[in-house]
Amino acid sequence: MVTRLALEDKVLANLRPTLGEREHVCGIAKRLLDAVAKSGKAKGMVVGSIARNTWVRGDRDLDVFMLFDVSLSREQLEEEGLSLARTIALEFSKSFHEKYAEHPYINAVIDDVDVDLVPCYNVDSATKIQSAVDRTPFHTRYITDKINGLIDDVLLLKRFTKAGGIYGSDQMTEGFSGYLCELLVLYYGGFTPLLKATAEWHPHMIIDPEHHGAKEFDEPLIVIDPVDPRRNVAAAMSLDRMVEFMELAGGYLEDPAEKYFLIPPAQTITKDELTELLAKRGTWLYAITFTTPPYIEEVIVPQLKRSMTAIAEHLDRNGFAVHHAHYTMEKERCMFLMELLVRVLPNVRIHTGPPLWNRTNAEKFRKKHVVSPLPGPYINEGKYEMEVPREFTRVEDLLKSETLLQVRLGKHVRQVLANGWELQKGSECWHVDFAPFIAGFFDRCSPLVRARRK
Amino acid sequence: MVTRLALEDKVLANLRPTLGEREHVCGIAKRLLDAVAKSGKAKGMVVGSIARNTWVRGDRDLDVFMLFDVSLSREQLEEEGLSLARTIALEFSKSFHEKYAEHPYINAVIDDVDVDLVPCYNVDSATKIQSAVDRTPFHTRYITDKINGLIDDVLLLKRFTKAGGIYGSDQMTEGFSGYLCELLVLYYGGFTPLLKATAEWHPHMIIDPEHHGAKEFDEPLIVIDPVDPRRNVAAAMSLDRMVEFMELAGGYLEDPAEKYFLIPPAQTITKDELTELLAKRGTWLYAITFTTPPYIEEVIVPQLKRSMTAIAEHLDRNGFAVHHAHYTMEKERCMFLMELLVRVLPNVRIHTGPPLWNRTNAEKFRKKHVVSPLPGPYINEGKYEMEVPREFTRVEDLLKSETLLQVRLGKHVRQVLANGWELQKGSECWHVDFAPFIAGFFDRCSPLVRARRK
């Protein structure tokens, strides 16, 4: 036990922001708040981990919200908000630009700090918010009020999840947000109690700190937002990220080692390594690549996920069993990567029809197929069957075919694919932009989840 | 309609036994009955289709039962029964030998007639029978009493099912017995009403001519024996034979054609034809052959059926999808024949473990696999997974391996396979003894069921 606490002390010594860093960042924050106050147009508020004192050394993300009166229309808010943000950015920064979430906001670099200047409504209850950004001040007030005494625990949890590859509520990671880390530490009363509690975690469990007993959610982990019962704070978390956290927690408690807090080096693979790996595995690798649709990750990545599932099902239905499939969205191009066990199939396929006692459908099936020059329909297990030519005997032909556009793709993915895609095979799937993704594809899990077991 | 009746008249003209034939066969029957009577030991009775007048021209199967008093012990019955049968056979035949069903009996050729001389008990109710043969006299009495006026319908149905490849209640055919044909004609009131009724047939339907409302059966077609409520007369019928009958009936009513009454020529295939067929199909054919176990078809064929299912599942579990598999029992050797779509697979396989929230089993799985030099276990869809080497990368290796003996084989099949088996591949599977079976394997159904549709 001493060992574990000593280790955590050592880790914390590198996680807590230095006094100089704190002074520097808070100084910038104060100057920005003063500027908002001076404008007289809105109330300034620092939110996020810097406001809550739960930021990790080296983090340079400062969120300054500008709370406007609710009497403004949405257009007015956007117009006046952006205008004020731009004025302030001009005053402090040489480099800033407009960004979009639900609303437009300004992102500016001030010294070495990445600052978001975000206009929002100053509502008096989180249940009256008009967009998600309005909720953020409430999160900050809730956490700031309660987190005292548990800040080190939050820092440990943030680093623990980051090192485990499960920190981030973006669509590619599907893991832990900072706010979720804070809530879990609060709920369980610390880092260690949380890790221990995961031994009893199970899918669809509900954590409800303020006993809202609110509406039903169907996500793997449900953490009811203390400030808004309608929201699951862990909505972005996938089942695998949740279970990987349980796995990491169990491993760390069993054998407390520094590796659980070390950010692993980025994975990558060279083309030669990929060639060698494929030769050893004897599998068939295919990549579909296409121009990244011009929308943000939050829009495109869920479409990629759904499309990948649909394409894998399409392959399976055609007799090509998918060993492993995954997707990625890079800046320029997206990729569907598929590893298969079989590349070529014979030219016969069984087409199963309805059972004969299902008269109407059986008769339809018979009338459709009786005109075929092939023998049949014959009967197997009470159903009509036809042996028909296989539509695709080579997986390449399927992956090049227009039938891909008929599966359940996401809207923007379909739009881009309608203009064509590239199909690569074997080690030709390799491209420098995709090398980290391909390395992770064959790794199947974050290095630490694997490390836990070895 | 006139066409159909005219066709049936024409068919019947060739089905009804000739007067000369009738006189000849009945003459032999009468002499045998006289001989039984003269012995004073048992009561003679002609049973089967000759007794019921439902035999088809050219049939030469005469069943003469010798009904002994129930006071005899089983041993006495067998001894005295066989002794009497042998005495009678000696008197009339130059060629006879002992055979076994539940009891021993004598099979003799008398002139051109194949005669069974069968000892049984003379019980006074079919529910008091001591073995299945004791029931036969009751069947004959039941049918003989009622069948008058419907004999032509029985002849038509027998020929219709025989031409369709579904006549015979043996384990290979799994089709219609003569008694079942008679009962169905009686129940529906004729050949045509029966065919029409099949439009409403469905699996697990119950036909209960004497309203016994007896015990539950789970066979596809249930026909309660009028003389014994505990027995399903259609117990041997498979779902496919039942449905093929529905198919043939529908086809004949739609387009009454003579082909429905013509026995198709025996199917066969030459080795060259098989070679050509396989080249065209591009599939992988394998045959396991072994010495036929020294037991009757009724014992071995069900074991072959179960074993074939188990072997196909074993192949599927190992990643080799079975396109089609079937079995046969010939005099000298038996065969499992399998057509596959894939012959070789890569050396990787995914081994799925329990979900992590199933603590006990998950821990067992982890402890077992964590010692492996391979990476993992990793997590997929909440479960542990390992990528492990594939046990069999070539289907030949699996089909040669001892693992075949670990699947659910029939007892006698396992005993023979334990001494080894032969594995043939491609056109080498061909052997003259198996040529008809192989032809049927690729035909997938009786020629007439196919003919119905073309």
Image (cartoon, coloured by chain):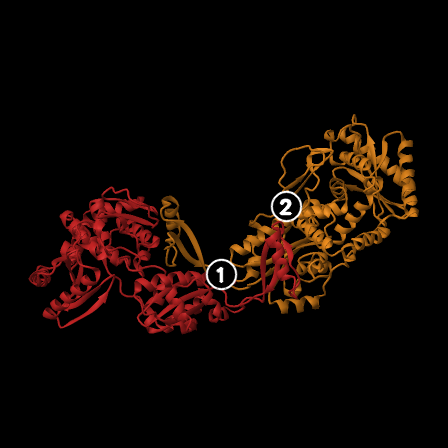
Chain colours: A red, B orange
Residue B428: x and y in percent read 66, 64
- Residue A316: numbered disc: 1
Q: Which residue is mark 2?
A: B202
Q: Are marks 2 and 1 in contact (CB under 8 Å)?
A: no
Please give left or right for residue B205 compared with residue A145 in the image.
right
* Image position of B446 with respect to A433: above or below: above
The secondary structure type at the circle numbered 2 is loop
Amino acid found under the numbered disc labelled 2: His
Query: What is the x, y in percent for residue A126?
Result: 21, 50
Q: Amino acid at mark 1?
A: Asp
Where residue A323 appears, as percent x and y from the top left, is 45, 61
Q: Chain of mark 2?
A: B
- Asked if residue B34 can be seen in this view, the reply is yes
Determine which quarter of the picture holds residue A100: bottom left
Q: Is residue B284 left or right of residue B241?
A: left
Instruction: Please name whichever residue, A298 or B376, is drawn nearer the observer in this view of the structure.
Output: A298
Q: Residue at x 37, y 71 (%)?
A: A273
